[in-house]
Image (cartoon, grey):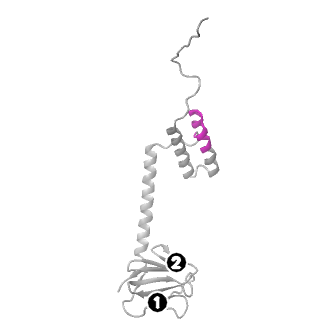
Amino acid sequence: MTSPEFRTSTAAPAWPARPSEAEREQALAVLRDGAGDGRLSHDTFMHRMELVLAARSRAELKAVLADLPADGPLARRALRTVGRLSAFAVRLRSAWRAERLPGLTLPRLGPQALLIGRAPGSDLRLADSSVSRSHAELRREADGWVLYDLGSTNGTHVNGHRVTGAVPVHPGDQVAFGGLAFRLAGT
């Protein structure tokens, strides 16, 4: 009886190499970018993600990503630069608008509470349809001025955040009653 011979070959194996975890992660990153850019719907993203995780060859990964080219470092850098410039423009516009707001001076002496609204008896009467009849109240307390929203329809905002309850305010803060905005000033 002769023993079977085993040959070793230097040729490539007959089966394709499975993608590595790093290649799968890179493919998932391309899919996430595509979904974030609006090139893929949520359902398409989920379906393709399953295909990437189940891929048995690199060719299957390439087929899933065929219409989503991977962005190189130059494209990512350009995208980040555009994002930063856009954010700067938004901040600049916001700062420009904030400096142009009319001033609302907080009195050092006088009443302990100022009623703000459209009603004729308001201490600060704002004749604008976005302001409620009894919109807000500024009260002087031990630590300074505190702004209260009185259940207004269009809200009271301090520095862009909606007031719920009481919020301390200081000179320099931006306050908005409905659609009217002011910059608080001290006396």
Closer to the camera in the image, 106 or 52:
52
Asked whether, in this view, residue 20 is left or right of residue 105, the answer is: right
Q: Residue at x 41, y 77 (%)?
A: 173
Secondary element at image label 1: strand
In the picture of the structure, the residue carrying the numbered disc 1 is: 114
The mark total stands at: 2
Secondary element at image label 2: loop
Question: Residue 94's x, y, as percent?
Answer: 44, 69
Question: Residue 102's x, y, as percent?
Answer: 43, 81
* Residue 87 part of the magenta segment: no
Crowding near pointer 1: few (<14 within 10 Å), some, many (20+)?
A: some
Residue at the farthest left position: 187
- Assign the magenta stretch its main secondary structure: helix
* Residue type (three-letter) at the residue carrying disc 1: Leu
In the picture of the structure, the residue carrying the numbered disc 2 is: 164
166 to 108, vertically: above or below: above
